Amino acid sequence: MSRERNRKGEGSIYQRKDGYWISQIYVGKKSNGKHDYKRKSFKDYDEAVAWKATVLADQQLQPNITVPEPPKELSFSDWLDLWLRDHVKPNVRPRTWENHSYIVNNHLKPTLGHCSLTALEASQLQTLLNDKLQSGLSNRMVELILITARSALRKAVEEGHVTVNIADTVHKPRKEDDNDNTDMAYMSPTEMATFLAIAKEDRLCIAFQLLLGTGLRVGELLALRWVDVDLDKKIINLRLSAVRIRNDDETVVNGNNYKVILQEANRKDRQRQIPLNSHLIKALQRWKVYQDYDRQLTGDQYVDTGFVVTTSKGTAVLQRNLTRKFHQLLVKANLPLYSLFSLRKTFAVQLLEMDVRPEVIQELMGIDSLDYFMEKYGGVSQKSKANAVEKIGVG
């Protein structure tokens, strides 16, 4: 027997790990809104029962003291809503809040939302994660669900709603043959040359040249402005990133439920200088002339946003449109349908195969951890393995 359950207002008794019995009675809320209890510990269970009965009897005998109604127990769904509203949205970037909100509403609440927050068990969360993995979700998505649950429950512990974070004992399931890192495939030098030969006929070729030649993130590319590009010094001063978030504005234009915002890089390593080689300098100079032609052709309809990568009307290019164009060009070049993000890995792998030191590439790409860089981008290529074997002299 580890815990006694009673009717509302009768208090409770439970046993700690050290063997002591804790008798507690709810007495209302503190000034900060947290629940307040009157508690006492006993070595003997019967003493705990007797003390609780005495305290309750004293409260009933005193006319000015009433036993307050215990608060309605929070469900996991209720807590997740409070956590998103009061702790996540005011303190993180819009995209981070949107990601947590998506996981809460699409993965956590439908299955576990009905559970009492205090009665939620680690086995229930573990089962949810296992089922999600078996249903076809990627390793990474399952990991993000666990991260969100763990963060929400950590805050619940801090606020006194629960005593332990049950998510800390849950392990992350993983499929060994998972192929969720399709964006981590990369082009061979031959494939890159084939792709660029086709892409050079398209007005957005400059976007793919920059991704392949600088290792920029897609959001960084789409937020790049001419004011951040110094063609004379041959550098990019990277400061911003473009992020697509849900549009909370009640006046949604043309059914567009999303908007793109610019935000400053959230870490110093992402605010960086990137050198440009002579090929990119010439490509950017040609593109600048092309943009001027767009401006003259469009006239008053042209929107001078100052972005490097733009539509023919001067407006920012959306990531989904860039992805669509990328896939069209891949089909035209008879190449596999790589992810747009694979261009970043192509940049990293080619430099690694040129024997550029990993820490140099890591800095160019704005990655703060060398371990993370090597785990994500440092996979050994077939060429590297072949070169290594060639060095073994057995003839």
Image (spheres, rainbow, N blue to C red):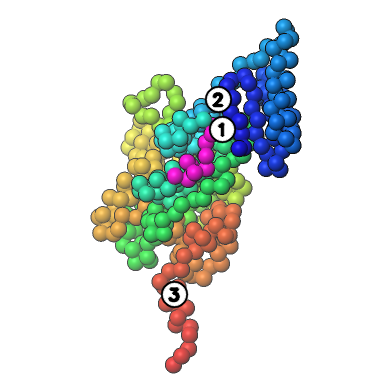
Position of residue 55 in the picture relative to residue 361 (left or right): right
* Residue hosting label 3: 385
| CA neighbours of label 3 inside 10 A, class few (<14), some (14 to 19), many (20+) | few
Which one is nearer the viewer's eye here, 95 or 280? 95
Residue 94 appears in the figure? no
Which one is nearer the viewer's eye here, 341 or 229? 341
Residue 7 appears in the figure? yes
- Residue 242 in the image: above or below residue 31: below
SS label for mark 1: loop
Which one is nearer the viewer's eye here, 26 or 253? 26
SS label for mark 3: helix
Q: For the N terminus, which image quadrant? A: top right
CA distance separating discs 1 and 2 = 8 Å
Q: Residue 353 location in percent, x, y?
A: 47, 69
- Please give the name of the residue rendered at 58% of the width and 31% of the height, measured from the top-left corner: 87
SS label for mark 2: loop
Q: Residue 300 location in percent, x, y?
A: 37, 29
Q: Amino acid at mark 1?
A: Thr
- Please give the name of the residue rendered at 64% of the width and 27% of the height, measured from the top-left corner: 12
Q: For the C terminus, which image quadrant? A: bottom left
- Residue 329 in the image: above or below residue 162: below
Q: Residue 106 location in percent, x, y?
A: 41, 35
Position of residue 319 in the picture relative to residue 61 (left or right): left
